[in-house]
Image (tube, helix red, strand yellow):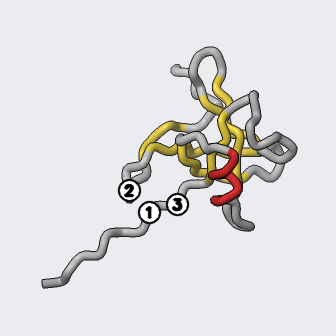
């Protein structure tokens, strides 16, 4: 029987094909989070943070496995891991019907 990994799955968004990680974050009332794998600068974190769009700390262990944690209390230039944001697909390119 193969062991199951505890972390999330690195994959691609089915709509826009961007690289994302999907994972349950938290111990008791876990949130199902899909986050971009692109690290953010402190300026980008300030620009992208919204009430319903959180910033997450993406930790990577020595085996290269990713784990999302709350970024609350971490400085924007955190040395523990990269800060990433919840994934949102970019706006679709307009197309013509005819």
Callout 2 crowding tier (Cα within 10 Å): few <14, some 14–19, many ≥20: few
- What residue did someone put label 3 on? 88
Name the residue: 75% across, 28% down: 80
Point out the image quarter for the C terminus: bottom left
* Cβ atoms under marks 1 and 3 closer than 8 Å: yes
* SS of the residue under disc 1: loop
Name of the residue lying farthest toward the top = 62
Residue holding disc 1: 90
Image location of residue 18, percent across then percent down: 42, 48
- Residue 11: x and y, percent? 45, 41
Q: How far apart are marks 3 and 2 (CA)?
A: 9 Å
Where residue 71 is drawn, which disc sits there?
none
Image x and y of residue 4, in percent: 58, 27
Give the crowd class for mark 1: few <14, some 14-19, many >=20 residues within 10 Å.
few
The quadrant holding residue 71 is top right
Residue matched to label 2: 16
Tell me what residue is drawn at x 76 percent, y 34 percent. Answer: 78
- Looking at the image, is mark 2 or mark 1 nearer the viewer? 1
| Label 2 with label 1: CB-CB less than 8 Å | yes
**Image quarter of residue 26:** top right
Above or below — where is 34 with respect to 66? below
Disc 2, SS: loop
Asked whether disc 3 touches disc 2, contact meaning CB atoms under 8 Å apart, the reply is no
Q: Pick whichever of labels 2 and 1 is earlier in the sequence.
A: 2
Q: Is mark 3 on a helix, strand or loop?
A: loop
């Amino acid at each position: 029987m193969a062991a199951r990994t505890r972390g999330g799955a690195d994959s691609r968004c089915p709509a826009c094909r961007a690289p994302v990680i999907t994972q349950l974050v938290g111990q008791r009332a876990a949130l199902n989070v899909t986050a971009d794998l692109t690290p953010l600068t402190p300026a980008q974190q300030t620009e992208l943070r919204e009430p319903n769009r959180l910033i997450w700390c993406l930790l990577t262990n020595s085996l290269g496995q990713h784990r999302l944690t709350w970024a609350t209390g971490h400085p924007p230039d955190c040395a523990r891991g990269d800060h990433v944001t919840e994934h949102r697909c970019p706006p679709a390119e307009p197309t013509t019907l005819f």
